[in-house]
Image: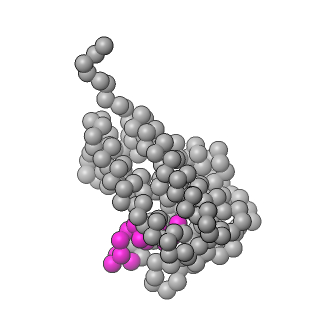
Amino acid sequence: MSLFRRSPGPDEVAEAIWQQIRKAAADHAKLFDAIHVPPNTNVEEESLYFFAFVADLSLHLLENQRIAGATKVRNALLNLLRDFGRSHSCGPLPTGEWLGDSLIWLRGAAPEAHGDPIANLNERFELYATAMKRRRDRAIGESLGHVLAAICGTTDISIIIANTAMFVPTFEGVRDVVKSARL
């Protein structure tokens, strides 16, 4: 028995973050059980893509701070996400439009064509990135929370608040795990 434990590598850290994202998405999707969502809306998968975006944002900021291993963890996590997107045939976003300069994205019709899963995944990330830039006077979590609710077909304020509340713990959790891993 060794007194020293081996530090986890970037792939192991990414896998641990990925498992937490999957668990958080499954738990978060249960909040939607009491409300109506449009047919063919997979709330658990949409929640997973939301949490993955937040984790990626956290890792991106760690890269900018030159935190050791952040780039390798980010790349490994994105590979896991892309594999998931392909295996679950990540579908395209519904059409939508922004309501004035507000945080509200109005969901339109579901697309007919399925498209490329990776392009569809990138489109989600682009929508979340746009949401963050729309209103700098509001918290990022609030901006993203509105979009996740809209993608899932609801404007229910309790869902938006729950989505918003999940941003900070996810963001900080990823940051803290990577910083403590000593990569």
Q: Residue at x 52, y 57 (%)?
A: 28
Up/down of 167 relative to 105, above or below: above
Q: Main secondary structure of the magenta part?
A: helix
Q: Which residues are magenta?
A: 135-148
Could you say which is closer to the camera, residue 71 or residue 163?
163
Residue pushed farthest bottom?
Answer: 100
Could you say which is closer to the camera, residue 129 or residue 8?
8
Q: Residue at x 52, y 53 (%)?
A: 27
The reply, left or right, for residue 84 in relation to residue 141 is right
Indicate the quadrant where residue 29 lies. Answer: bottom right
Residue 161 in the image: state x and y as whole percent: 45, 70
Image quarter where the N terminus lies is top left
Up/down of 32 relative to 5, above or below: below
Residue pushed farthest front?
Answer: 34
The reply, left or right, for residue 91 in relation to residue 176 is right
* Residue 32 appearing in the image: yes
Q: Residue at x 33, y 43 (%)?
A: 177
